[in-house]
Image: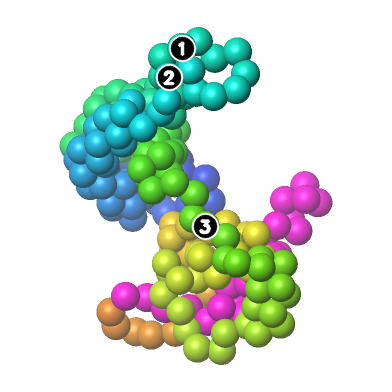
Amino acid sequence: MSQECTTDDCRNFTSEYLCSQCVSDLQSWIARIPILLVELRVTIARQDHVRPAGGGGGGSKPGSAAPINFDAWQISENLKTVGKSAKEYAHAEDAAGMAWLIQDWVKKAELLILGPEPEPVNTSHARERLKAEVPKEPMPTRDLKKWLQITHGIQITGEQLRQWVHRKKLQRANEEGRPTYYPAVVLAIAKHQDTQKVNN
C-alpha cells in the first residue's frame, strides 16, 4: 500500500514510513557517525586535561569535570545506539522522528568537536558590507550556508535545499557535479520561509 512519506514537508509516496530519498538522506547522516565517535573520544580526553581543577570562579567544586565532557559523552552514547542502515528505520512508525533525532545528534556532535564557527573581525561592518554585496556567482551548499549564517543570521541545511529543488522552488545552477545555487534566489526563498513561520 502506497502512502506519503512521514517526513515533514516530504510528499513522496512510499510503501514504508520513509521514502527512498529520505532513506538516502538519513544514510548520509548515519555514515558520519563512526568518525564522530572517534573524534568525540578525543574531545572528551582533551577537555579532561585542559580544564583546570575548580574551573575558576563561581562555586565550582575542585576537580569538577567541564560540562562539555558530559555533553560529549552523552552524545557519544546516543550515537552508539544508531543502527548502521537507514533502511532499518524505514519500517518503523516513528521513522521520521528517529531520522530527525539522529540528525540532531550528529549536528550536536560536530558542534562539540569543532566548536562554533568564529565570527569575522568587525562583524557589524562585515555584515552590512556583505548584505549589500550579494554574490552573483553560484555557490556550493557549504559556502552558501556560511554566507547566509554570517550575513543574514539565517540557517539552512542541505536537506532544505534539496527539498526546495524537489518542490521546484529552486533550481540548481549547474547540471553536473556538486550542486551550486544562486545566493540571491536562495536568500529570497529562505526569507520567505522565515516570514511564513512568523505569520503562523
**Percent of width and height locating residue 2:** 37, 45
Could you tell me how far apart the alpha carbons at marks 1 and 2 are, in whole angstroms?
A: 5 Å
- The image shows residue 34, relative to residue 189, as above or below, that is above
Residue closer to the observer: 200 or 151: 151
In the rendered structure, the answer to whether residue 127 lies left or right of residue 82 reads right
| Of the pair 123 and 184, the residue shown nearer to us | 123
Q: Name the residue under label 3.
A: 118
What residue is drawn where x is 75% and y is 58%? Answer: 195
Instruction: Report whether residue 89 is seen.
Output: no
On residue 117, the disc is none
User: At 49% from the left edge and 49% from the top edge, which residue is drawn?
Assistant: 116
Front-lying residue, 125 or 109: 125
Membership of 43 in magenta stretch? no
Is the stretch drawn in magenta largely helix, strand or loop? helix
* Pointer 1 with pointer 2, Cβ within 8 A: yes
* Residue bearing mark 1: 62
Among the two numbered marks 1 and 2 on one chain, the one whose residue lies closer to the N terminus:
2
Magenta-drawn stretch contains 186: yes
Label 2 sits on residue: 53
Q: How far apart are marks 3 and 1 (CA)?
A: 30 Å
Q: Could you tell me which secondary element the residue under label 1 belongs to?
A: loop
Q: Position of residue 158 (x, y in %)?
A: 43, 60
Instruction: Please give the name of the residue rendered at 44% of the width and 46% of the height, measured from the top-left corner.
Output: 115
Residue 124: image location, x then y, percent:
72, 67
The magenta segment is: 178-200
Instruction: Reply above or below: 180 against 78.
Output: below
Colour scheme employed for the rendering of this structure: rainbow
Local packing at callout 3 (Cα closer than 10 Å; few below 14, some 14-19, many 20+) is: few
Amino acid marked by disc 3:
Pro
Left or right placement of residue 123 versus residue 38 in this view: right
